[in-house]
Image (cartoon, rainbow, N blue to C red):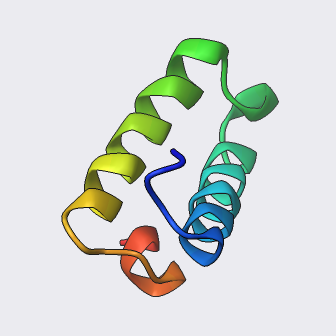
Amino acid sequence: MSDFNERTQANLKTVLEETCRELPTGGDHETRKYIAEHLIEAARSGKTTLGELRR
C-alpha cells in the first residue's frame, strides 16, 4: 500500500472501515482482505477519492 500517497492511504482505510462496519461483527479476516484487495485495485486504476472508492 506504500505505492499510494498519504491521502489515498487514508481514503482506503476509511472506506474499508466504513464498509466492514456494515458487516456482522465487522467482517472476518478473509472478508476484510477481499474488500481491501478490491479497494487497492480500484485505487491503482485511478479511483482515489472517497466518493470514487465508495462506489
- Residue furthest right as drawn: 25
**Which quadrant of the structure image shows residue 18?**
bottom right
Quarter of the figure with the C terminus: bottom left
Above or below, 49 against 32 in this view is below
- Residue 1: x percent and y percent? 51, 44
Nearer to the camera, 11 or 29? 11
Residue at left offset 64%, top offset 15%: 29
- Residue 43: x percent and y percent? 34, 63
Above or below, 6 against 20 in this view is below
Residue at left offset 76%, top offset 34%: 26
Left or right: 20, with 41 as reference point: right
Q: How many marks?
A: 0
Nearer to the camera, 46 or 5? 5
Nearer to the camera, 21 or 40? 40
Residue at left offset 67%, top offset 55%: 13
Left or right: 37, with 45 as reference point: right
- Residue 49: x percent and y percent? 46, 83
- Residue 20: x percent and y percent? 66, 43
Residue at left offset 67%, top offset 27%: 27
**Which quadrant of the structure image shows residue 11?**
bottom right
Left or right: 7, with 4 as reference point: right
Above or below, 54 against 18 in this view is below
